[in-house]
Image (cartoon, rainbow, N blue to C red):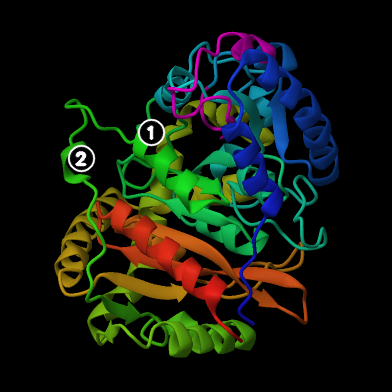
Amino acid sequence: MIKLISCSSSQNLYKKINKLNSYLSIKNFYKSFYKKFKKLNHKFRFTSSIDLKYVNKQLKNIGNRKYLFFGIPFGIKDVINTKNLNTEYGSAIFKNFLPGNNARVVDKILEKQGIVFCKTTTAEFAVHFFPEQKTLNPYNKEHITGTSSSGSAVSVSCGALPVSLATQTAGSIIRPASFCGVTGFKPSFGAIDRTGILKTTDTLDTVGLFANNISLLKEVFKNLLASSKEYPYSKNFFEKKTKKNINITIITEVFKPYNFYDNQVKKDFIFFCKNFLKNYKIINNKKFKFINNIHIHHNNIYCKSLAYYFENLKKKKNKFRKTMIDMINIGNKVKKKDFSRSLQVQQSLSKKFNLLMHDCDFLFTPSTASVAPKIGNVEKTDTCLIWTFLGAPAISLPIFYDEKTKLPFGLQIVAKRYEDFRLLDFSEKILMKVKNYKF
């Protein structure tokens, strides 16, 4: 069914912070805020590191309201360097590791007087699967939270934080967003600086966000955007207003694994398309058949890159989880010529996608093929890694809810690369349509 899932506690949290205007008011707010945060963290286990002395030190340095992030507590995925909090990459090998520096994106948060509140849990080296029971799904603890950015997703979904940083190399933002009923945004490749962030794959790693307020998400993204001359992609980002006449494409059977999506996902998505997209011109989706060839090339690039970047840790291989070992072993079997070929395919298909998107403003597809599977079960193949491979911005909106399982799943909207602001504006309009729809 269509059901706008709203984490009101996350949104109310942001509204309360917006009203604060002095150190005393912030200090009092954070006392009550931390009590609630602590209870939620104990219940859902989404934090890997927190230091209240460091939080208080940041609060004392806050100046005035002219800074956008004034007093906002941020969750930071534990593959992103923080000078004062442990960065363990979800690995026993780096237990209690302090990298000695902040990632540039973390420094930007601090410069704008945001609060680096905690590190959020991640899969080992941000590689796909979470250990069972490490972080719990707020809707049902017997079901998975998703892939490597799940700690950040849960921190916002359960109402503990208004916004959290995340990364995506395959589907690590969109999947947890879908499974945990929260808004997850994967920007265009290169939008947010990756300096000081664990590198797994040069052409795929992307920094993104979770939030339950699109306006907040948009402002945070705008202020974290790598926009100076030293960034080659920054000149391509500019704020465009959504056009009056919108052309869209609906990705269903053109993607072959769609036939194996859960019936409830397909049923609800079809209902959404019929009732909410009827005023837009729908472009034939057959030109997008090429997306069916992407998974194998993504796998070649991802696994070969892991094998290369983690070569220096091979002596500690016995401490790796099985998933990591399996992917490295696959990577070692990928021949250099096949790796180079997959990189060439990535470039050519990205260009092809951008050309096709001249005639299409947005793609619509379910975020995932099902609701969150039970722990121990594997997710069905979906489109998430395709948009990562193509460097395109994608967002998952929490508007679907399966009454039978009592679990959410998301609507995914994709735009042309660099049209992130248009995507966010349009997504806000879609959410408003759902909110005002009379069922």
Q: CA distance from mark 2 to mark 1?
A: 14 Å
Q: Which residues are magenta?
A: 56-81
Q: Is residue 7 above or below residue 114?
A: below
267 sits to left or right of 227: right
State the image coordinates of residue 298 (x, y, percent, origin top left). Answer: 37, 58
Near-viewer residue (162 or 267):
162
Magenta span includes 67: yes
The residue at 57%/41% (across/down) is 163
State the image coordinates of residue 392 (x, y, percent, origin top left). Answer: 31, 57
Q: Is residue 267 above or below residue 212?
A: below
State the image coordinates of residue 367 (x, y, percent, origin top left). Answer: 51, 68
Name the kind of residue labelled 1 in the image: Leu
Q: Main secondary structure of the magenta part?
A: loop
Query: Quarter holding the C terminus?
Result: bottom right
Query: Quarter holding the N terminus?
Result: bottom right
Residue 233's mark?
2
Residue 303, can we see it?
no
Q: Earlier in the sequence, mark 2 or mark 1?
A: 1
Mark 2 or 1: in front is 1
For label 2, count other residues whose C-alpha is less than 10 Å away and answer few (under 14), some (14-19) or many (20+). Answer: some
Near-viewer residue (245 or 396):
245
Element under disc 2: loop
